[in-house]
Image: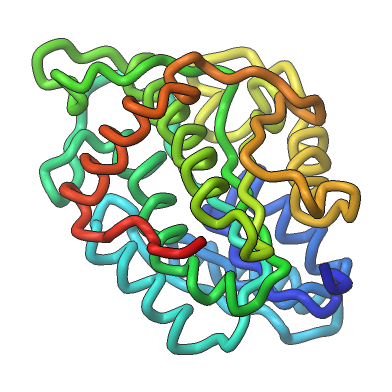
Amino acid sequence: MSPVSEQTILITGATDGLGRALAHELAEQGATLILHGRSPRKGEELLAELRARTGADRFGYELADFSSLEDIGKLADRVLATYDRLDVLVNNAGIGVELARQESQDGLELTFQVDYLAGYILSCKLAPLLVRSAPARIVNVTSAGQAPIDFRDVMLERHWDGGQAYCQAKLAQISLTKDLAEQLAGTGVTVNALHPASYMPTKIVVNLFTPQSSVEEGMRNTARLVTDPALAEVSGEYFNRSTLARAGAQAYDPAARARLRELSESLTGVVFPALG
């Protein structure tokens, strides 16, 4: 890949926690950043921090609420209309283990939409731009907490469980990682997923769990997948922190992945990219 200082990188969920730390790290390395969030105030604060810290003005902020499929799609459309290249897409935005079932603006189980479908839409719609910019990378920030999807009750309407909602969305991310890696093989675009660290002290953790890892650790492991030249040819893998690992079994099942692709296309109206 080209030097980080010549790259344009999109980070979703950039105004808090891991995403914010990653934005600071990549800004200091000279990257042009497209930063996503859903708070205008937090976005302006982040841009001011990065400009003050680097003395540069190569950062843009894109507002989108991932509880809206329309908002997610419009974010991708704005990136396509505004930027002539995209070197890295970091699908980082997400919510944690919810205590009660919530629905998105589209009537879908909220965790599945925010943690999985948002990354599906962005990856699929931005794939042509990534291919034109190749070598390029997609990095999916997932979790070691994974559970198979029950396709009879994906939206958990019959039996709600916050842990299942979170863990099935994270496994879906890894399934998408493997599908995209296969589809984009030979294009110069790699796709990998990682569990960055366990129970970092972020807003989705502190109210439910005792933090175990630092945001700095998670940021370093994520930045490695974004920038490390040694990973230029690595694709379709899941990393637990910095180590190659085995994900949940369903992620390796072609039939289950095909079923997830069909469901994702049906729910979002976004077709899996016909590239390869």
Q: Is residue 5 left or right of residue 144?
A: right
Q: Residue at x 18, y 28 (%)?
A: 155
User: Which residue is found at the position 49% from the left and 23% from the top?
Assistant: 252
Q: Position of residue 200 (x, y in %)?
A: 67, 27
Side of 85 where 112 appears, left or right: left
Say whether residue 265 is left or right of residue 182: left
Instruction: State the residue in front, 54 or 134.
Output: 134
Residue 217 drawn at (x, y percent) = 81, 33
- The x, y position of residue 34, in whole percent, is 59, 72
- Front residue of 94 and 234: 234
Viewer-closest of 35 and 231: 231
Nearer to us in this view, 44 or 97: 97
Q: Which residue is depicted at the point 31% across and 19% down?
A: 99
- Horizontal side of residue 19 vs 168, given as left or right: right
Q: Quadrant of residue 144?
A: top right
Q: Position of residue 250 (x, y in %)?
A: 42, 19
Check the image and report above or below for 21 versus 35.
above
Relative vertical location of residue 94 with respect to residue 209 in this rendering, above or below: below
